[in-house]
Image (spheres, coloured by chain):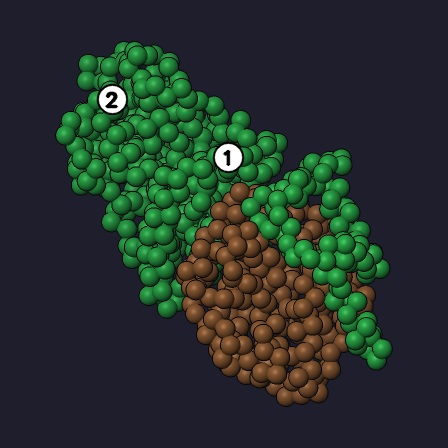
Chain colours: A brown, B green
Amino acid sequence: MTIHTQGITVALFATCINDVMFPGTPRAVVSVLERLGCRVEFPLDQTCCGQMFTNTGYFDAALPDVRNYVKAFSRYDYIVGPSGSCIGAVRHQHPMLADYAKDAKLAEAVDEVVAKTYDFTELLVDVLGVTDVGAYFPHRVTYHPTCHSVRVAKVGDRPYQLLSKVKGIDLVPLEAADQCCGFGGTFSVKNPDVSVAMGADKARHVLDTGAEYLVAGDNACLMHIGGLLHRENSGVKTIHLAEVLAHTEGAAA
Amino acid sequence: MSTPRSSSPPLRSPEQLHGDPAVSTDAARRTPAPPAGTYLGMPRFQKNAREQLANEQLRKNLRHATGTIRAKRADRVAEVPEWEELRLAGEAIKNRTLRHLDTYLVQLEESLTRAGATVHWARDAAEANRIVVDLVKAKGVDEVVKVKSMATQEIELNEALEEAGVAAWETDLAELIVQLGHDRPSHILVPAIHRNRSEVREIFLREMKQYGTPAPEDITDDPAELAGAARRHLREKFLRAKVAISGANFAVAETGTLVVVESEGNGRMCLTLPETLISVVGIEKVLPTFADLEVFMQLLPRSSTGERMNPYTSMWTGVTPGDGPQEVHVVLVDNGRTNALADPDGRAALRCIRCSACLNICPVYERVGGHAYGSVYPGPIGAVLNPQLRGIEHEIDQSLPYASSLCGACFEVCPVRIPIPDMLVHLRKQVADHKRGPHVESTAIALAGWVLSDHKHLELAERAAALAARALPHTTHLGPLPWPASPWTRARDLPMPPQESFREWWRKNRGEERR
Ligand code: SF4
């Protein structure tokens, strides 16, 4: 893959949950990418990847989101989102949904736009060729590799590559890191007891690390684990990977 | 019904049964009664799961057992450099077999018949049970020994035999624990995984004496002592049995060879000592050629028990004069499999070789155990298989596709690459379509669907969220709230939305120059 050191235009797919609930994360993506010399655009007609609908069994409710995604992003060469889960859904479920709709034109357009869609960590490491983004974060953190970032978007060890280059960071390993935190989208409310039982174990492992921050690439999972940590008054904060990478010495937390 | 012989266990009076209210007190029973009620009558997964989660002993047993076997599997798989190629080969062989299932099944029947076996075809559980019961009764016996078999558990053969006055004795150690415990299996490979050794000791002490050789009164919970008690208890049954019933891990169409893979050797006792052997085999167990076993004999033990090779592999091809069972029957069972085969999004489940790796890795299974799934097939494979085999008419089968966080760990370990998460999503669609008419979920989805179908709608919602945030400027999180927020907030705080959405920020800060 060609590595572009700067000057590319990147369309930001904020994802609906970040747009509404966690705007600090897409703002952090903008800040990191602009720092690296990219031009960032935010197509205002974007909405959501639709996986909440797909994964609950309502394919028809997800189809407008698939069409929206194509409409909002087709004209760009690089599309980036700060969520392994939503990027995974675009890659893995949008083609399936286009097939389901029996819409060959949509399927073709989806294939094209999917090929240009990146998780934030992939864009940094693979397209921009950087692992040191000039970040400074003088805290003890632990990283939870969210299931969809690892098993669907397949970001591999890119998050660790990026975190390990952050100045001042004390990155400590998380026990049973590869186990699901129990969020699981609508699973968290359709099977709340199991979801919380899984989350409680994840929260316990996080506490065992002595970290001040739990970092992940998906705010939905962080909302779930963070909800448990906050209920316990544990004093451990959650933060999206992009926000760690956006911190610089000038603006240390 | 034939009269019990003196060597058979005595009939028990109701007083002899222990005080579990779930246990039927049918005095005429020959074998321990399973819990009352049927799988299909069970409530939905969510409810069962909540009950199971409250059982600390179960949680501890499962955490320990799944953790151990998971680590063993990972070690044994890591030492095979071409593991992914093996998985792909397993997937390809099974796919080819399923594509031409009709041809291979007929070939299997021909090979078996040529080798001296008698082949029977069963459309469903009732038919399969009737065939087996008739075969057993024709031999004039009132008891059989059983090799651990998922197919016979699926069709609930033991109860069908019991009703016909025939005692079916499980000889696999874990199945024996389940049977003596008046219990149901909770794992494909280790059906008593929910029991620890002190519970096993209690079951052996209390029950063995009612059905044959008792456990020593001073038995401890040492695994070797427990295994010794089981061995003594089973021995008389092995030596007495005239008829054995098994399943099969594989059935080779080319040769008519049936294969049973096991760890204890109890299966081999059943497969070699009795005069008559009846094997109940799901139609998806067929493999085209003997050479195909090469792939599966590598995939199965490593995925299943985390062993390079399982201790006992028994293969038999019809009847061998003067050696082993002289009367061999094979009952080929559909029982919903052709329904699964007809569904392009569902048929991959028929590739399953019942290794149970997906159960052991599953974070949901690890916490709730197998009984919550309302089937002999629990865990991820159960969540996709049961609704296909049984349909989605019942509450339990409608809830199973949702018994997963879609974390994807099951697909990663599955030796035949069954895309369980994708299949769960497709089954969820079937369930959602099945529940016609407006209900809470479909209404919520319709509302959310409307909000997210167009950015203008989303912006309206964002403004409403921002208004709420401005109304409570000092609140960062919401604590426990009434329904509909309660499922989330009962245990988890909910962050407040920000006063400004990202879109709003973008408009203010970047919107002038760029979109
Ligand atoms: S689905 Fe795959 S992992 Fe699960 S039991 Fe079947 S073969 Fe094993």
Q: Relative to B79, say whether B66 is above or below.
A: above
Q: CA distance from mark 2 to mark 1?
A: 31 Å
- The structure residue drawn at horizontal position 47% and vertical position 56%, both measured from the top left corner, is A202
* Secondary structure type for disc 2: helix
Q: Relative to A122, say whether A201 is above or below.
A: above
User: Which chain hosts label 1?
Assistant: B
Depth check: A139 or B36 in front? A139
Residue B23, percent from left and from top: 39, 20
Residue B211, disc: 2
Q: Is residue B435 left or right of residue B197?
A: right
- The structure residue drawn at horizontal position 34% and vertical position 48%, both measured from the top left corner, is B64
User: Which chain hosts label 2?
Assistant: B
Give residue B182's quadrant in the image.
top left
First in residue order: circle 2 vs circle 1: 1
Residue B107, percent from left and from top: 44, 44
- The structure residue drawn at horizontal position 71% and vertical position 68%, both measured from the top left corner, is A13
